[in-house]
Amino acid sequence: MEGIFKTTPEIKKLSFPVPGKMEVIFSDGRELRIPIKYFPSIKKLNGEQRKKWYILGGIGFSFDDCDEVFHVEQLLG
């Protein structure tokens, strides 16, 4: 059996490489690119505000100028 098992996805890095997309890199090497249209509170942040993100316990993240906390489950569905 192949695949990723018994691994908790932990956020390592967050970026916005192209307009309208957010990229999340996990500590195990997985990468996820997702449209920010699914996250209206992130979408309304400007480029400088999006650079001021921080990780919460490896499984969540937020921004200095945002009241929302986002979790891995929201990214992966």
Image (tube, helix red, strand yellow):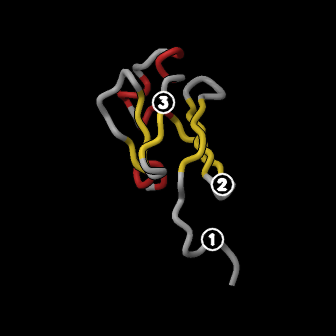
The residue that mark 1 highlights is 4
Q: CA distance from mark 3 to mark 1?
A: 27 Å
The extreme front residue here reads: 57
The residue that mark 2 highlights is 30
- Label at residue 53: 3
**Amino acid bearing label 3:** Trp
**Amino acid bearing label 1:** Ile
Q: Quadrant of the N terminus?
A: bottom right
Looking at the image, is 57 positioned above or below residue 49? below
Q: CA distance from mark 3 to mark 2?
A: 19 Å
**Amino acid bearing label 2:** Arg
Picture quarter containing residue 28? bottom right
Q: Position of residue 39 (x, y in %)?
A: 40, 34
Between 17 and 20, the residue placed more toward the observer is 17
Picture quarter containing residue 23? top right
What SS does tag 1 mark? Answer: loop
Horizontal placement of 35 versus 28: left or right? left
Q: Are marks 3 and 2 in contact (CB under 8 Å)?
A: no
Q: Quadrant of the C terminus?
A: bottom left
Residue at 40% over, 20% down: 44
